[in-house]
Image (tube, helix red, strand yellow):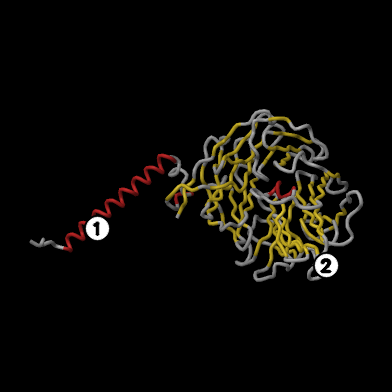
Amino acid sequence: MEADFDSTASEGRVHRAMTLIAASLVVIACSGILYLYPAVLALGAADGKAAPVLASAYRIGAVDFVSPRVGWVVALLATGEVTLLRTADGGRSWKRQLSIQGDVHPQYMRFYSDKVGVFALLGTRPILYRTSDGGTTWALRPALAPGTSVVSWSFVDAEHGWMLARDAGAAAAAPVRLWRTMDGGITWKDMGPPLSPPEQAYQVHFSDASTGWLAASGREALAYRSDDRGATWTRVALPAPNGGWPISGQFFVGVQPTQGAGVLASVVYFPPIKGRTGVGASIRAFPPLTVRSFDGGRPYTYTYTTVLDRLVVGGRTGAQPPNETVLSTTDNGATWTAIRPPATSGAIGYFNARDWWWIGAGKWSASSDGGATWTDPRGIRAMEPLPGMLQVLDGDHAWFAASAGTRPLLQSTDDAGRHWRVVTLPPLAVTL
């Protein structure tokens, strides 16, 4: 006997059964996520604008503390989302703030008090965010026309800032132009190219409203300083190592102000390219220091990690550059001293022009003369800091970022580095 059945009803029952099974699986999955990550919902979306959907791994892009208790962390999610986390109690609790799609663009963050700060992206999204209430709300201020590529930002306070930018559609070798704002990014003044070819500027750093420095490449080992808010730039000669500087080739001179009249410089030399198949190199970008090298055969691109990369760029790895000379000044470049950190690894921080710290894996050392000499490294109970992630607030307090496997965390000290505590960061949810 053949069975007589209603195929339409049967299909409906099957559909309802599959729907119930799928819903059950979603509930089970969500329950598992909430069990493993109870803070997902609490730190899901910023300002409640989007619903959290799934916990995501992330790494730390920057750390900025204005006091031992108040600070911010830039979290870089695997999805390309960039979000800021704020603590007001020394890392015991965190609040998720600004969240944007970063698309792997480098970031710039600087806070000047527990209320006022700026955040910006580098690359072809020349936009600036500014807050005056500690990050609760942010004002979006487009800086230049879309497509313009921002190479570097520098702010000394909430009102005075500079950026290096390349016009939309311009070739990578085209000179960058310097722009200045005196009203917190509402308006920008075009200052023109700070350098003329073949010199090329890669970064701008101002230490106060008048004094600025450029990281640049050229045919000589020269630094460039402005004392008039970027209107003009003066060449600053750097002392040569034993044997003098080479007479031909290309020099990269990276410059990073520390505090006040303190400046750290990294000078790297590459030989000139000789013919189509000769040996030599050309500098392509910074940071990180990217070099196109020729060895008589195929050209190769190398990425190097300089002392300045370790100071200001997080998470960078690469070979040490050849012929790197590291110099320090505490008088705005009037005199320079050759320095050598305790190790090529680890991180360097400073709280004035002369007082520096170095921290490696379980080691700590200090300098009181701008890096010229260092104390013997002593053992401490601290992890290896991420490159560029050590911030020394004063003689007693410091923070740095580290990671335990894939888990980001912070460590801090309140007693000049003798004891360190671990501060865990919360899981984050991907937002839609």
Mark 1 to mark 2: distance in Å?
A: 72 Å
Tell me if 173 is positioned left or right of 28 in this view.
Answer: right
* Residue at the (72%, 66%) spot, across then down: 298
What x and y, as percent, mark residue 77?
53, 51
Tell me if 38 is positioned left or right of 260 in this view.
Answer: left
Q: Amino acid at mark 1?
A: His
Residue 194 in view (yes/no) = no
What x and y, as percent, mark residue 248?
87, 62
Secondary element at image label 2:
loop
Q: Which residue is mark 1?
A: 15
Residue 205 in view (yes/no) = yes
Q: Which residue is mark 2?
A: 274
Q: Quadrant of residue 261?
A: top right
Please state which of residues 225 and 74 is positioned toward the viewer in this rendering: 74
Q: Which quadrant would the C terminus be assigned to in this image?
A: bottom left
Q: Which quadrant would the N terminus be assigned to in this image?
A: bottom left
Reply above or below: 269 against 352.
below
Q: Amino acid at mark 2?
A: Lys
What x and y, as percent, mark residue 138?
55, 52
Secondary element at image label 1:
helix
Please state which of residues 201 and 54 is positioned toward the viewer in this rendering: 54
Q: Furthest residue to the left?
A: 1
Q: Nearer the viewer, mark 1 or mark 2?
A: 2
Mark 1 or 2 closer to N-term?
1
Reply above or below: 24 against 229.
above
